[in-house]
Amino acid sequence: MTWLSRLLASALGCAGLIAAGAWGPAQAQSAQPLEYVALGDSFAAAPLVPQPDPANLACLRSLSNYPHVAARALGARLTDVSCSGAKVTDFGGRQFGLVPPQYQALSETTDVVSLTIGGNDTDLVTRAISCVNLLPEPVGTSCADRLTAGGRDQIAADIDRWAPSLGRALDEIHRRAPHAKVFVVGYGSYIQDGGCFPRQPIWARDATYIQGSVNRLGDALRAQAAAHDAVFVDTAPLSAGHDSCAPAGTRYLEGLVPSSPALPLHPNAAGSAAFGTALAETVRAAL
């Protein structure tokens, strides 16, 4: 072999090594599906929406919930530990005494984390149910009057007091999954301003108050996400017009008497599909 041949062979070998170093790992990495972990409460779990997840029947988790929709859209490998009734303390503790802590699903290989949490911590669902009035005013009592008596808004105070615990949870998620991008998915538009009595048996002012409280919780989720290196996914504009006052078949969130398989005051299959698609689009944009 001449010196020129040896030089060309050496040059081609170096070029091959450079190409392998530059493209090989990237190609190998891109071939691997995203490792996606879904945390959260019943808004994420979508209880009673077909089909139930047999992995943990106690959590009433659906295989059609928004994490599963997002995972399919992203081609991601999903570990879904969302659980109906969860509070932020259940991220680190055993829910119902038997469901493992949700944090256990996180690891250094996790790429994406989503969560919806706070509705149970602030008793929003039970307080919304307490707003039911089957008869029009003045026969009954107003939950808005009761929960804001004396000039103190009990739900607002509970949201403000709880919000920092979400920030601490986000910090812990980052610690356990240091390479992951974290997405906080907000609660949607449950009922239109002024309600739709008697279609939904909540007086107009109570409907406005309850949705205002949901919006306040959404603002807290957004603020904590921004302060703790997470992305907020706002489902309120997406579900506006698809709330519990919308005609059956167009709702994303069910009312006190569901029009499709879902737990009252929770996402149905259409809502879960819409929220999961929005989450997947946000993940793509962020990554």
Image (cartoon, rainbow, N blue to C red):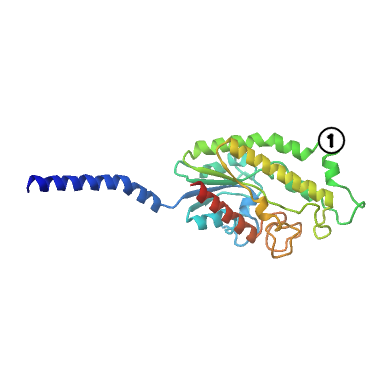
Eyeballing the image, is 269 above or below 204? below
Give the residue number, with chain letter if any, for mark 1: 151
- Percent coordinates x, y for residue 154 in the rendering: 78, 38
Residue at the far left in the pictured view: 2
Give the tally of numbered discs. Answer: 1
Is residue 55 rendered to the left or right of residue 215? Answer: left
- Percent coordinates x, y for residue 41 in the rendering: 63, 48
Residue at the far bottom in the pictured view: 249
Residue at the far right in the pictured view: 138
Is residue 178 rendered to the left or right of residue 91? Answer: left
Residue displayed at 46% across by 50% down = 34
| Frontmost residue, 274 versus 57 | 274
Residue displayed at 69% across by 42% down = 217
Mark 1 falls on what kind of element? Answer: helix
Eyeballing the image, is 201 above or below 2? below
Among the 4 quarters of the image, the one containing residue 222:
top right
Q: Is residue 239 visible?
A: yes
- Percent coordinates x, y for residue 21 in the rendering: 30, 44
Residue displayed at 62% across by 62% down = 50
Callout 1: few (<14), some (14-19), or many (20+) C-alpha neighbours within 10 Å? few
- Percent coordinates x, y for residue 65 in the rendering: 60, 56
Q: Amino acid at mark 1?
A: Gly
Q: Is residue 56 visible?
A: no
